[in-house]
Amino acid sequence: MPHSSSRPAFDRRAVAKSLSRCANATVAEVLAASTAVAAAGGNARRIGFTGAPGAGKSTLISQLVRHRAGQAERLGVLAIDPTSPFSGGAILGDRVRMDNMVQDDRVFIRSFASRSAHDGLTDNVADLLDVMDIHGFDEVILETVGVGQTEYVVRIMVDTLVLILTPESGDQIQAMKAGLMETADIYVINKADRPNARQAANDVRAVLAQTSAPTDWKPEVIETSTQRADSIEQLSDAIDRHQRWFATRQDQASVARKRRAHQLAEIVRRQMHRLIADNAANWLDRPLAAAYSELVRQLQGHS
Amino acid sequence: MPHSSSRPAFDRRAVAKSLSRCANATVAEVLAASTAVAAAGGNARRIGFTGAPGAGKSTLISQLVRHRAGQAERLGVLAIDPTSPFSGGAILGDRVRMDNMVQDDRVFIRSFASRSAHDGLTDNVADLLDVMDIHGFDEVILETVGVGQTEYVVRIMVDTLVLILTPESGDQIQAMKAGLMETADIYVINKADRPNARQAANDVRAVLAQTSAPTDWKPEVIETSTQRADSIEQLSDAIDRHQRWFATRQDQASVARKRRAHQLAEIVRRQMHRLIADNAANWLDRPLAAAYSELVRQLQGHS
């Protein structure tokens, strides 16, 4: 049997199993596994997409993934879906469609229900991304649903952050204007065939022109429509441009440290909320100072 | 000097000083003060307002405060402003206007710069609200700026949550539909003189009709315009209706416990982020399990 020069395709089942194990791990297990994670190294390109529900993220990402599959031997998509009794069905529907739209041996797609119901995010994104690194993915796309603040976490964990807006995103553009949103690297006005798309794009450009960027990357604004293949290509090219900038102009050690700090904070927070929810022996009813001591004591016990 | 039957007006300077002290307190100081807080009791009605920048919150709240000042001997307004080098000026402008619009001995207005820049919220809202209780306020209005997730914190800390939308709030209404937003008690469509206001109100009603409410309070949807005094009165009446419902139908002990748990979590989080930012001796560079132990050890030291 001839050997191919490219790496063998990833083991789809093994990846799925690792992700499931990670998603269900206790804090003690995550901490115990972390040495192996650090040893594995790994450095998938990380591209985050975030936007309001209904912004057309899934369809756009499906098209983008098909376009980018040629560039990566192993391309992963992790999608965090809000946990909602009301919308669960519709969002799952989207996801099934994404799986059908992208059938490619090089592509792995997995969705997760968000574990913290209030922001549509999961509190273990950092751990899940680690798993993808361990399995040697070249590129990972992280899709999250949110308006406004969700992108804060995503911002830290990804190299390239794409914010997907639509002509109906008036509130979010106001929030940008007020400095309430993290700076994205690429702003997409999706559904650009609708009226007011050009206006929304110009509004975003105007806000960006008045905002002093935190780095020397100049954020790009791209109008996309799933009807226009060239707009998908433009988006993909912009991502490549930003990836090159990120790889050469950002201090990788400082990025890694920031991500580690965030991961640690999430782990402590997770454990803290579990302890508070348990509240064994009703220690929450004690005065605040005593409750603080007890909480921290219990955090120590669970390391 | 004749004694008035009503309580003397509050000491404006003392309130301002207490709030400033609280805003600058270390975690150790907050914990040390907490016994006094618990002893003081206090139970101001707490009404939270949240909405995107530009939704007209400050003007609406000013009018509402003038309307409600007659009902409360001591009415406080705490406004949390996003900390933003870009928008700082404009938002401060609003605030000065609110102070001018409401000149009443019974009303105390104070704004705070948010301390966690990424969500326009401050991480010590619970402590600030405690201060208002200590000073015997009857009613406190908490104003926060946000799109989407900000209301999570506010939801826990207030009795009545009012979400201010506008005809341009398409993304937020989509987020409601997806179950991504906390349930408010009252939804305001402000700027109701604009086109599409009725449509936005109907969209919100349609979402609410399909959402199973977490309690037996039926959320109200009110169209307001600062041009129409009767709409301010309608809003105020809706708040009163919800306050009566809250006082009689909610388990106050369970509400208090939830708030205490949240306050404790915020205090731990605050201390954790300070320790991470300090990162003395670079303990963050150690393997995750070791960093966790060190972080928790340092948390203990600062109780």
Image (cartoon, coloured by chain):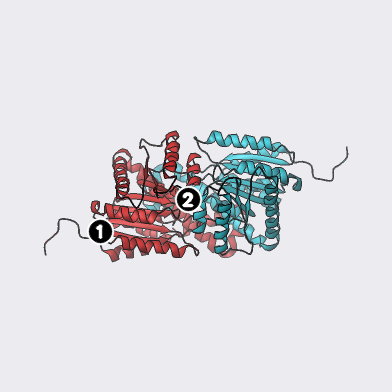
Chain colours: A cyan, B red
Q: Nearer the viewer, residue B96 or B302?
A: B96
Whether residue B206 is situated above or below residue A239 in the rendered picture: above
Q: Nearer the viewer, residue B232 or B112?
A: B232
Q: Please identify the residue farthest to the right as the structure is shown.
A: A2
Q: Which residue is mark 2?
A: B147
Quadrant assignment for the N terminus of chain B? bottom left
Residue at left offset 30%, top offset 40%: B245
The answer to whether A256 appears left or right of B242 in the picture is right
Residue B203, given in percent of the width and then of the height, sits at: 45, 39
Chain under disc 1: B
The answer to whether B16 appears left or right of A257 in the picture is left
Q: Which residue is mark 1?
A: B106
Say what secondary structure mark 1 lies in: loop
Q: Nearer the viewer, residue A102 or A262?
A: A102
Visible residue check, residue B246: yes
Visible residue check, residue B22: no
